[in-house]
Image (tube, helix red, strand yellow):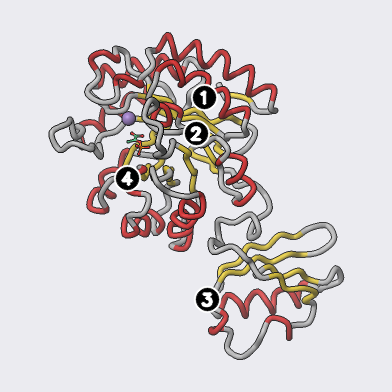
Amino acid sequence: MIIVMKHNASKEEIDALTSHLTSCGYRLTISEGVERTVIGAIGDESLLKGKQVQTFSGVDEIIPISKPYKLVSREFKKEDTVIDVKGVKIGGKELAVMSGPCSVESLEQARIVAMRTSAKGSRILRGGAYKPRTSPYSFQGMGPEGLIYLRKAADEFGMVVVTELTDPRDIEIVSEYADILQIGARNMQNFRLLHEVGAQEKPVLLKRGMSATIKEFLLAAEHIAKEGNSNIILCERGIRTFETYTRNTLDLAAVPAIKNLSHLPVIVDPSHGTGRIECIGPMALASVAAGADGLMIEVHPNPDEALSDGDQSLTPDQYEEVMEKVEIIAKAVGKEIAK
Ligand code: PEP
Ligand code: MN
């Protein structure tokens, strides 16, 4: 529920209410406005120990949160969430660009991509070490060795690391090297995994499941937030439709729709979203124009030899070209790429 306090409510009245709610297991966000204080409260009403919120003095209005997802909803928190990852901001005025290979293949490969993309404003290096592959015979990732290479390359060029976690049993090793834990499309509804990343402190990049509705996507984020971690970045990466020419159908309308429903930052991955080189640049531009807080783009020094997703990986030169245009669109919508 959202509790709107009277404009003359005293600090004592507010404290009495918030400590009662906290003692009943409620999670609160308190916004102290110039006019009045507004309290967002999530919890189980049956635990209110007989003392209902409306009986507290100083309470003006109680508005129930109508959506099934609560903590991640815009009703619960009006302001945009800005996530700070070692000084790299995701969700504010800066456009967060995450780039790198689909899979980490060697230190040299990760270094080249980190060098070239960081020079163009990417401050977040991506790369998979544990790969969720459709075929069990495809390259499954380098595992811990890949994590080490990714970290080394990122550190050398002042970047932070995002990499996928596919199994709760790997959370310790992945967290040792990563700054942001990625939950892939295939695991968006792996609830045990969601609870695991919700119960730790690193920010989580949650990708939309390939057949997930926006409501299911936000409920998956709610599973993470309910465990205590609200530092969640949502990533639109295309959904399955009848169209097969593109790998997925990039649902760009999801960006403004989700930003209206939720306070969480939303980024777009046009690489997995389209699977086609000629679509990645234009869809990156369209994503920024649609209000995305960031991009995730696959870049490989030699896409023809990539061990995964070479068909949708940009060369560093192609990436540079795309980023030059992205910069112009970002400026037009009041965002800037941090250098
Ligand atoms: C990825 O980003 O490497 C990936 C596998 O993406 P998705 O989960 O969106 O398919
Ligand atoms: Mn990939």
The tag earlier along the polypeptide, 3 or 1, is 3
> Quarter holding the N terminus?
bottom right
Q: Amino acid at mark 3?
A: Gly
Q: Return the mark for residue 283.
A: 1
Q: Amino acid at mark 2?
A: Val
- Provide the secondary structure element on which disc 4 rests: helix
> Quarter holding the C terminus?
top right
The tag earlier along the polypeptide, 1 or 4, is 4
Contact check, label 4 and label 3, Cβ < 8 Å:
no
Drawn side of residue 22 relative to residue 331, left or right = left
Residue 215's x, y, as percent? 51, 54
Report, in whole angstroms, how far the alpha carbon at label 2 lies from the one at label 3. Answer: 35 Å
- Provide the secondary structure element on which disc 2 rests: strand
Residue hosting label 3: 25
Residue 284's x, y, as percent? 52, 24
The tag earlier along the polypeptide, 1 or 2, is 2
The tag earlier along the polypeptide, 4 or 3, is 3
Residue 130: in sight, yes or no?
no
Q: Return the mark for residue 186.
A: 4
Point out the frontmost of discs 2 and 3.
Answer: 2
Ligand 1 within 8 Å, label 4 CB: yes
Q: Amino acid at mark 4?
A: Arg
Report, in whole angstroms, how far the alpha carbon at label 4 lies from the one at label 3. Answer: 33 Å
